[in-house]
Amino acid sequence: MSLKKFFQLQVMSALAVMMVFAVGCGEGEDDADDTLDSDSNNDTASDTTVDSSTDTDTDTGSEQPTDTNSDTGDPTDVPIMTYTFESGLQGWEQVWFEPDTDLEFGEGVVMEQITTDGDPDAGAVSVTFDPLAADYKVQLGVNLEPAVDLTGRTITARVKLVEGFTDDPSTPGGTMMFIKTTNGWIWANGSWYDLNEPGEWKTIAFEVDYPDFENPAVTDTDGTVLYEPDHTQVKQIGIHFSTSGTAADEEAGYVYLPTTVLFDSVSF
Ligand SMILES: [Ca+2]
């Protein structure tokens, strides 16, 4: 190699090193200047880590009771009972319907366990009825033996309108959950939910400490209190379905249609 060639190579090598160094500095300066990007990256990483940990704990069945208790200090977040209806009605039955002037109790309502639908898993209760009037009501429930303390608890269920109620979307049918407490069978119910989206499962809930309505104490003819509402003595829980119309609606010509509703995953 000639001396000239040697120096040429040395110069080229030096230029190559400088170029690499310059590029490296450029990147470093970009990062250092781009404070927002840097912070954003750090924040995202940090948030993801925290969320991931929390989700994992919550989703993991074995850790759920411990985590839920420690997070909220409230053991009522962990359900003590869930009806999944995988293989039967699990004690649920028709407990009321009205108007009942033309039918014997149990007539006109078909209640059965099905395996062709359900949420989240197959197995649900199907209830079919032909509304007799604008204010038709049907109630399905299960007796709790012995009575259960539901103070601080929320009853939830998944409900689906398959078809029916009314041809007028301004007066949809709907549903709510109820309890009956003590040997006085004192009624209390949660919020009303419209059922106006056929084919859609929706969650309904009843925070037992805060009923939308609750019957007063049961008294005898002298006014002596026999039974007072008592959410530590829940004897029955149930789901109420109603056309929710009025006589005026009926006179206005609204048609009440043969109805099928499903419910599943009743939990408290
Ligand atoms: Ca199910």
Image (spheres, helix red, strand yellow):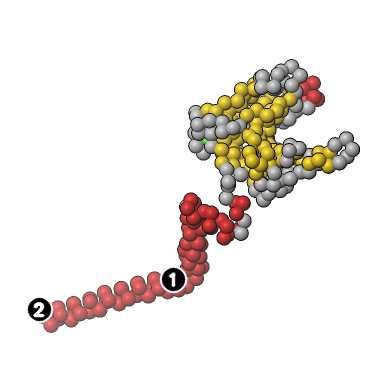
- In the picture, measured across the screen, residue 70 lies left or right of residue 219, that is left
Mark 2 and ligand 1: say if the CB distance to the nearest ligand atom is below 8 Å: no
Q: What residue would you read off at disc 1? A: 31
Amino acid type at mark 2: Met
Q: Is residue 23 left or right of residue 85?
A: left
In the orientation shown, which residue stands out farthest toward the bottom?
3
Q: Which residue is mark 2?
A: 1
Q: Residue at x 50, y 62 (%)?
A: 50
Label 2: element kind = loop
Vertically, is 252 above or below 123? above
Q: Amino acid at mark 1?
A: Asp
Residue 65: give x, y in percent of width and height.
53, 54
The quarter of the image holding the C terminus is: top right
> Between residues 205 and 29, which one lies in front from this camera angle?
205
Q: Residues within 10 Å of mark 1 (few under 14, many from 20)?
A: few
> Would residue 143 appear left or right of 90 to someone viewing this image?
right
> In the picture shown, does residue 64 fall above or below 205?
below
Which residue in the rendered view is the most extreme toward the right? 222
Residue at 14% x, 78% y is 5
| Mark 1 residue element | helix
User: Where in the figure is residue 263, as x and y percent of width and height?
Assistant: 59, 33
Counting residues from the start of the chain, the first of labels 1 and 2 encountered is 2
Gap in angstroms between the C-alphas marked 1 and 2: 43 Å
